[in-house]
Image (cartoon, helix red, strand yellow):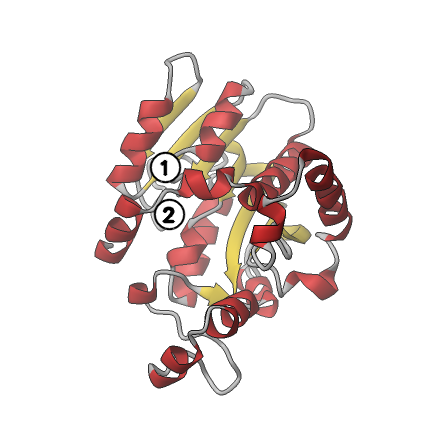
Amino acid sequence: MEYLENFYNSFSEDERLLTQHGQVEYLTTMKYIHDNLGSRKASILEVGAGTGRYSTALAREGHNVTAVELVEHNLDIMKSKLTGSETIEAVQGNALDLSRFGDESFDMTLVLNPMYHLYTKADKIQALSEAVRVTRHGGFILAAYCMNEAAVIQHAFLHGNLKKVLDNDMVTPEWHCKSEPKELFELIRTEEIASLYAGLPVERIKLIATDGAACYISECIDSMDRYTFEKYMEYHFATCERQDLIGASNHTLDILRKL
């Protein structure tokens, strides 16, 4: 908890998502939220809502949103954005315990940050189980993950940290990152994601690459004019569901439907 508080007290998630390359992840996530909601106004729970980038946007679209956030600093920023006209409730809470909410309370549950910071399989399954429990039958659970290969390629090789990574025993012989709380982010592979919901009453709708190559070529994307960026987004949307590319994305979004 202390590692997370220290990190988010000094890191602006909003600024990351507002960069042009960060917009790739944001626009993709919002596209698939809208695709699965259709035109209806829905009750949405966002678990690990951060500073409310998604929750506030969805509330302003007219959805009835409940935002749960663990870190008080993030929660304060989220609340400061609200005008009072939004149908949103922002509360402090933990993804591992959603007991304040009854079974089948929401049409959609978003778990867009917690899986980044849960370091055991048991905790990941617990967070998913809680998200599934509070979602209505036929509703959707969208869970985001940080991917292993992008971290290895970028952190170890692209950014010149290979010696540090090896000297500190941060990867296995199979090049799987050894994530710990002090490293902040839990890195995962696609086959591990599938194993997390194997015993839950859900079916996978899609697993998508929310940012694809965006972080690899962030400077290029940030320098694009509007026309070029729009064409890049066309390319990204045409390829973000390709399973042969997903494992190399920085972030993925697993879209599940409750049976």
The quadrant of the rendering that contains the C terminus is top right
| Left-right relation of 167 to 131 | left
254 shown above or below 68: below
165 shown above or below 253: below
Mark sitting on residue 68: 1
Residue 81 pos. (x, y %): 37, 23
Q: Helix, strand or loop at disc 1?
A: strand
Q: Nearer the viewer, residue 257 or 157?
A: 157
Q: Helix, strand or loop at disc 2?
A: loop
Whether pointer 1 and pointer 2 mark residues with C-beta atoms closer than 8 Å, the reply is: yes
Residue 218 pos. (x, y %): 57, 52
Q: Nearer the viewer, residue 30 or 70?
A: 30
Residue, far top = 85
Residue at 45% x, 59% y is 125
| Left-right relation of 93 to 187 | left
Judging by the rendered image, the residue that carries numbered circle 2 is: 95
Counting residues from the start of the chain, the first of labels 1 and 2 encountered is 1
The three-letter amino acid code for the residue at tag 1 is Val
142 shown above or below 171: above
Whether residue 229 is visible, yes or no, is yes
| Left-right relation of 239 to 29 | right
Residue 6 pos. (x, y %): 24, 52
Residue at 38% x, 40% y is 50
The three-letter amino acid code for the residue at tag 2 is Ala
